[in-house]
Image (tube, rainbow, N blue to C red):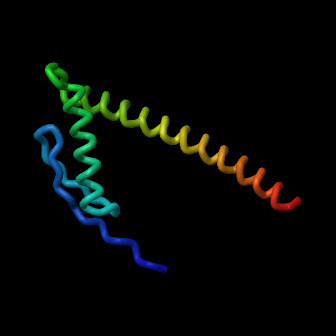
Amino acid sequence: MPSASPRHPVEVEIMGQRFTVASDDGEDHVRKVAKYVGEHMRRLSEGQRIPAAQVALLAALNIASEYWKLRESQEDLHQRVDRISQRVLAQLKR
C-alpha cells in the first residue's frame, strides 16, 4: 500500500490576505484553487464596497453552485453512458 503524501504548507494570497494552506493535493493545485477563488472574489467586489466576509460567502455560494451543476451534469452523462452501454451489450448478445 503506497504511503500518503505528506501535507505541505503552501502560502497563498487572496484579496490581499495571506493564508497558509496544508494540503495533500500539491502546491500547484492549491495555488490554482486559491487563484480561482481570488478571481471570483475580485469579480464580485469589483467597484463595490462589500465586506470581505460577505464577498467570501457570495464566492462560496457561486462556486458551490458551479460544483452542483457540474455534478448533476456528470451524473446525467453517466446515466447516458450506462444506457448506451446496455444497448451495445444487448446488440452484441444477439
Q: Is 65 positioned to the left or the right of 78 in the image?
A: left
Q: Would you place residue 14 above or below residue 54 in this image? A: below
Q: Would you place residue 81 above or below residue 25 in this image? A: above
Residue 16, by quadrant, is top left
* 8, 82: nearer the viewer: 82
Q: How many marks?
A: 0
Residue 75, by quadrant, is top right
Horizontal and vertical percent for residue 37?
A: 27, 40
Q: Residue at x 54, y 39 (%)?
A: 73
Q: Residue at x 77, y 50 (%)?
A: 87
Horizontal and vertical percent for residue 5?
A: 35, 71
> Extreme bottom residue here?
1
Q: Residue at x 88, y 59 (%)?
A: 94
Residue 79, by quadrant, is top right
Q: Would you place residue 32 above or below residue 8 in this image? A: above
> Extreme left residue here?
16
> Extreme right residue here?
94
Q: Residue at x 69, y 50 (%)?
A: 82
Q: Is 87 positioned to the left or the right of 4 in the image?
A: right
Horizontal and vertical percent for residue 2?
A: 44, 78
